Amino acid sequence: MFRDKPTAYDRLSDALSDIGERLAEIEERAVETVRPRPTRTERLRRSFDRANPFHSEPTGLARYLPDFATGWSLPSTDEARRHARSLRDSAEHGAHDARGYFDDARNYLSSVRLPRSIRRSEPERVLDSLRARPELTGLLVVGGAIAVVGAAYFVTKKVQEHTEEPDYDVVRDDGEIQIRDYDGMVVAETVKSGYHEKARRSGFETLYDYIAAKSRSGKKIAMTSPVLQQLAEGDGHTKGWAVRFIMPKKYTRASLPEPTNTGVTLKEVPARRMVSISFSGNFNATLASKQLMKLYNYLADNNLTQKGDPEYAFYNPPWTPGFMKRNEILIEIMR
């Protein structure tokens, strides 16, 4: 059901490895088939190229190409030797001049004394002070962490206070697991492929464009909570993830503006009974599988009949710290 996201490094490493193996295989087959033996002229040309510091030795199959393919004319034997000696002498003189230049530069730089204000900037002096007083560093780190968490908590609470959630009645409360009766609702839905997190983010963007009137004309629609996600099936097989926004209660299916994006559909969801499990943390495959197993065990222990696939509910904005996030898994059951 779930598949964790492969890292960019893993994908790049696998691709480069495959390309390298294929190239090596192709070159090996070509060499085994042709088995070229360089002529005396070709060996002389290669000796001349190695003496030329501005020439790069061909690699791979290019080593076996004839001269007309490179567009380079071969010199005579005497010319090749004369050019080789000239290039070698030029290289030796160039290396000698370069050594002298770098020696002079090193001696000059070692004698230069920068002003104290330049050598030690203000940030460096602050860092030195913090290193000398580790207790102050600890207080700053703890204080900064508390400030970040406090700000995230404040913003999350304010968002939750002004975000509408669907109505339901609790039929049975067993701590983290509840049986709820939900009223009917209207949802905007889009189906996305890929692993669960990628599909949810892509679906969120598509649905947000609809409620924010970016992909249609008319007024904006208020954001509600939670964002729902469920496996989507078509023609008897899974085709991706259905991501849903619950529409505010004041709207009906008829009063909602029609989506102009063909990937967005409006659906009426009838009243239903759901069993839910609530948990915190950053949602991932391991956490979801653990909580889903608890829910299945609860269904079995209480002889409850499942009607549909699990539905995943996400209540908080992305910036919410993991321990403050509210996640739920819901399964529709027979009344």
Image (tube, rainbow, N blue to C red):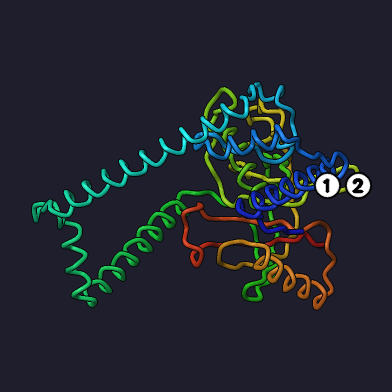
Graded by Cα atoms within 10 Å as few (under 14), some (14 to 19) or many (20 or more), the crowding at tag 1 reads few
Q: Position of residue 200 (x, y in %)?
A: 64, 48
Q: Decide if residue 290 is on the left or right side of residue 148.
A: right
- Of residue 128 and residue 279, the one placed in the foreground of this image is 128
- Of residue 237 and residue 109, the one placed in the foreground of this image is 109
Callout 1–callout 2 Cβ contact below 8 Å = yes
Quarter that holds the C terminus: bottom right
- Of residue 203 and residue 92, the one placed in the foreground of this image is 92
The quarter of the displayed image where residue 314 is located: bottom right
Q: Position of residue 54 (x, y in %)?
A: 50, 34
Quarter that holds the N terminus: bottom right
- Of residue 113 and residue 85, the one placed in the foreground of this image is 85
Mark 1 — residue? 233
The quarter of the displayed image where residue 257 is located: top right
The amino acid at mark 2 is Gly
The amino acid at mark 1 is Glu
* Image vertical order of residue 14 relative to residue 58, above or below: below
Mark 2 — residue? 236
Graded by Cα atoms within 10 Å as few (under 14), some (14 to 19) or many (20 or more), the crowding at tag 2 reads few
Q: Decide if residue 131 is on the left or right side of residue 169.
A: left
Q: Position of residue 258 (x, y in %)?
A: 66, 27
| Identity of the residue drawn at 60% across and 53% down | 9
Residue lying furthest right: 236
Q: Position of residue 238 (x, y in %)?
A: 83, 48
Q: Decide if residue 34 is on the left or right side of residue 323.
A: right
| Identity of the residue drawn at 69% across and 30% down | 254
Q: Which mark is residue 334?
A: none
* Image vertical order of residue 225 relative to residue 57, above or below: below
Q: Circle 2 — which element? A: loop
Q: How many marks?
A: 2
Q: Circle 1 — which element? A: strand
